[in-house]
Image (spheres, helix red, strand yellow):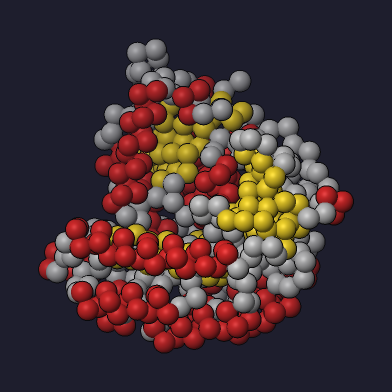
């Protein structure tokens, strides 16, 4: 039987696509390989939000071809959409399929499995390049939601594309305009996951808070969250990244109702992209909020949920970011109740307004590194202070996978990595007593073994054809 491997790069929405492709291949008779070197077909699901993301994808392609010269290698995702000919020119690549044609990846993979490369590495099938700059609503629903009893914290992508047009961002080009999965389709997917024993599900999207605006009739994102919590039996819902302006008062009211108790059904976790704490830089980025507005949202979230994890994306070195503007951003971040940050350097993307700004007023690479180091130091201390507040307290968590030495990796509802004593199966909701800190998380023990949710039988890995820890721990 032919075997596949899916390697995912980038955001949760991208990983949701990769999980759906893997699910489709299993349904149609292919088996997941234990690793890429053993696969007949390797599918590389790329990101292209930065030049570093592109570089990582190319490095992985070289490694796959070196370790598995006879594999057929298919590249999809945002890099494939943005620069298909660039990828097609690489000797490691057999096919390039953009986001616009992602629903055809499984078909092409099955064709490749039937016609592998020869022992000399010769490509027996002409290289395919399937990319279009048009995106349709039908394409969003064409990838099946990959969720069964073997999935731990899977991603349900309910929205794709973005219309914000931030000056640094290539996503409108690689993902198209904003489009939403129908409400009833979303609910059917959640019900199926819950009925099969799933515990925690993560709603994801490229601009998640815009869900429903394009539907007829139009809906608001909080309507989707409300419907999932009231019309399904899902144990825990986690929301992925949501823009500051989409944290409405109605959405916060749902947290007031569903984020309490011993086992919160709505995870106490908020991720709001910030990018910069400088008003001048936010204006150059064409972001749709000001620092005061962002701080107001965070204050409401923290007042409502004192124990919630609060995170942000922060971009360092946007063109024209002077020392004074960085200090303004640093001071703003220091004053906010962040518990973690995703830091990344500005990366000039062709065909964006910031591409020209970078030519005119770049920030030196050394300066960018120094600024990132300063923010890392700041957030390490903030994170440790936050985590220390939970020692000797009880938290709710879902188990993810075994760890060496007879322990279990879990994730608390407020987004803290937890090392549990003893081995537990994945995908079980547990109440734990926190006993200490680890380098980047917590340690603890199950408080009451009698109250652990029922075991979910599973005969294969939790994330077939992917890396479980990477997929499980992203917000």
- Name the foreground residue: 314 vs 181: 314
Whether residue 198 can be seen here: no
* Above or below, comparing residue 445 to residue 336 in the picture: above
Query: Which residue is farthest top?
Result: 119
Q: Position of residue 194 (x, y in %)?
A: 76, 54
x 34%, y 59%: residue: 344
x 18%, y 65%: residue: 363
- Name the foreground residue: 410 vs 161: 410
* Above or below, comparing residue 39 to residue 306 in the picture: above
Q: Position of residue 327 (x, y in %)?
A: 27, 76
Q: Is 474 positioned to the left or the right of 69 in the image?
A: right
Q: Which quadrant of the view contains residue 270?
A: bottom right
Whether residue 119 can be seen here: yes
Q: Position of residue 460 (x, y in %)?
A: 68, 33
x 56%, y 27%: residue: 33
Quadrant in which the N terminus appears: top right
Q: Is 287 positioned to the left or the right of 411 in the image?
A: left
Quadrant in which the C terminus appears: bottom right
x 55%, y 47%: residue: 471
* Above or below, comparing residue 217 to residue 359 in the picture: below
Q: Is 339 positioned to the left or the right of 397 in the image?
A: left
Query: Which residue is farthest left?
Result: 360
């Amino acid at each position: 039987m032919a075997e596949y491997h899916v390697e995912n790069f980038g955001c949760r929405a991208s990983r949701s696509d990769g999980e759906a492709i893997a699910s489709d291949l299993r349904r149609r008779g292919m088996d997941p390989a234990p690793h890429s070197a053993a696969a007949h077909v390797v599918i590389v699901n790329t990101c292209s939000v930065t030049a570093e993301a592109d570089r990582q994808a190319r490095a992985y392609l070289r490694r796959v071809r070196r370790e598995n010269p006879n594999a057929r290698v298919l590249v999809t995702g945002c890099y494939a959409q943005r620069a298909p000919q660039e990828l097609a020119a690489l000797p490691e690549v057999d096919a390039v399929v953009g986001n616009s044609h992602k629903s055809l990846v499984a078909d092409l993979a099955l064709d490749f499995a039937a016609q592998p490369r020869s022992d000399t590495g010769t490509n027996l099938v002409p290289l395919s390049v399937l990319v279009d700059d048009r995106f349709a609503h039908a394409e969003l629903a064409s990838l099946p939601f990959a969720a069964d009893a073997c999935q731990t914290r899977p991603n349900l992508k309910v929205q794709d594309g973005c219309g914000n047009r931030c000056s640094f961002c290539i996503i409108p080009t690689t993902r198209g305009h904003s489009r939403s999965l129908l409400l009833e389709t979303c609910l059917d997917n959640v019900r199926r996951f819950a009925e099969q024993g799933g515990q925690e599900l993560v709603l994801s999207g490229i601009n998640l808070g815009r869900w429903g605006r394009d539907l007829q009739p139009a809906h608001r994102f909080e309507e989707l969250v409300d419907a999932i919590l009231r019309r399904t039996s899902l144990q825990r819902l986690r929301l992925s990244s949501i823009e500051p302006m989409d944290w409405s008062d109605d959405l916060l009211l749902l947290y007031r109702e569903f984020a309490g108790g011993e086992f919160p059904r709505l995870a106490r976790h908020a991720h709001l992209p910030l990018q910069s704490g400088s008003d001048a830089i936010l204006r150059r980025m064409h972001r749709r909020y000001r620092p005061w507005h962002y701080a107001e949202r965070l204050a409401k979230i923290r007042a409502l949920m004192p124990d919630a994890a609060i995170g942000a994306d922060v971009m360092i070195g946007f063109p024209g970011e002077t020392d004074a503007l960085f200090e303004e951003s640093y001071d703003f971040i220091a004053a906010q109740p962040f518990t973690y940050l995703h830091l990344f350097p500005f990366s000039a993307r062709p065909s964006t307004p910031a591409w020209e700004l970078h030519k005119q007023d770049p920030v030196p690479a050394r300066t960018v590194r120094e600024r990132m180091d300063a923010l890392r130091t700041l957030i390490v201390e903030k994170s440790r202070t936050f985590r220390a507040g939970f020692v000797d307290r009880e938290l709710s968590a879902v188990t993810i996978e075994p760890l060496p030495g007879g322990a279990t990796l879990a994730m608390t509802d407020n987004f803290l990595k937890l090392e549990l004593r003893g081995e537990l199966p994945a995908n079980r909701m547990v109440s734990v007593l926190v006993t200490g800190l680890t380098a980047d998380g917590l340690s603890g023990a199950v408080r009451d073994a009698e109250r652990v949710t029922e075991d979910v039988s599973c005969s294969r890995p939790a994330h077939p054809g992917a890396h479980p820890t990477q997929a499980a721990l992203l917000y």
